[in-house]
Image (cartoon, helix red, strand yellow):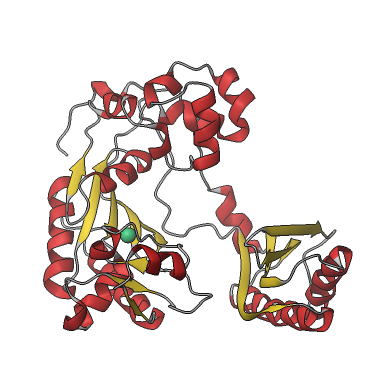
Amino acid sequence: MTEPVRKILHVDMDAFYASVEQRDNPELRGKPIAVGGSKERGVVAAASYEAREYGVRSAMPSLTAKRLCPHLIFVKSRFDVYRSVSAQIRAIFARYTDLIEPLSLDEAYLDVTEDKQGIGSAIKIARLIRQAIFDELGLTASAGISYNKFLAKIASDQNKPNGQCVVLPENGEQFVSVLPVRRFYGVGPKTAERMAKLKLETGADIRACSMAFLAEHFGSSAEYLFYAARGLDYRPVRPNRIRKSVGAEHTYPRDLLDLAALEAAVREVASEVWERLERHKTSGRTITLKLKFSDFKQITRATSLPEAVQSEGELDSVLLALLSREWPLDKPVRLVGAQVSALSSKVFRDHEASGDRVGDTAAVGLQQYRFEF
Ligand SMILES: [Mg+2]
């Protein structure tokens, strides 16, 4: 049996939050802006391309951003607006396919193997989607087009902003072979460092490794790396992403020092998590407390119950017990987070059963296929 060749798009908005702000306020256009708080505690949620030229990046502390770009303009985030624009973008996607897997407000995978309009060309669909986003929403997007999610995601970054890139089945292996390992999805700075020590610099270097070697050094990522290095990835585009955890966290304007304040913070976060669990009609067995300290170091402490947590009161007491085990803390706390995982609702189990199947098909030489992209 041969694997049917799929046509997958990864569409990614360019500097999404910042672009929405520049669209809605002409005074911000062409200027370095950062969405997020400028205060001491602020973190950049998104930076315009003008700001990126100064090295400003998302997730960067606002103070650092200001130092890099002294005339940086901070704009308050408007998530309700971003969410509604995101819904508009998804409505554009839905003209072509129902197989849409959002990764966040501003990016999604689309399976257009069989598009609704019978266009037949993934390259053309990507162009049409980007044009519609521009004409109707006044925003630009970039797209990656390929035969799997792994390559489509890398490709969308290739000609950013306002560009697209296709990796054809016959080119996938070659494309990956020259790819620096840090561009592999899921390879963070730590893994990249470990790879550097092993002299693994490109996809070709990973490809030369046996599964056993990869398993020894990269544990559960071995299979993914083994296939990805061959340009292969069999994960389907899943219209409903499996929710693996439900969580919430708060950064406090002032560091929390005493136990009473911390306990109040834990209860506040717990109540938010409980509300979300109820909304998603789920619950879970594993409960995690996260504390981030004034020096930005963080700890997580988790415990697993025999059964899914049953009430907000129970969630409270488990989290407070985790906190009391750490008490006294040796430094002040700036962020408190809580998460419930190992979710167990009926709905969740059904989804999980039809979840990812990576690598259960023998490596198929996809290069041999030729078809209209
Ligand atoms: Mg983006």
Res 45 quadrant in image? bottom left
Q: Where does the image place residue 189, in percent across and percent down from the top left?
A: 50, 42
Location of the N terminus (image quadrant): top left
Looking at the image, residue 82 sits to the left or right of residue 279; the answer is: left
Residue 130 sits above or below residue 360 on the image:
below
Residue appearing at x 77%, y 58% in the figure: 302
Res 5 quadrant in image? top left
User: 85 or 71: which is nearer to us?
Assistant: 71
Asked if residue 56 shows in the view, the reply is yes
Asked if residue 360 shows in the view, the reply is no
Location of the C terminus (image quadrant): top left
Residue 347 sits above or below residue 281 on the image:
above
Looking at the image, residue 84 sits to the left or right of residue 170; the answer is: right
Q: Quadrant of ligand 1?
A: bottom left
User: 161 or 307: which is nearer to us?
Assistant: 161
Residue appearing at x 59%, y 72% in the figure: 280
Looking at the image, residue 40 sits to the left or right of residue 69; the answer is: right
Residue appearing at x 59%, y 78% in the figure: 279
Residue appearing at x 23%, y 64% in the figure: 50
User: 189 or 373: which is nearer to us?
Assistant: 189
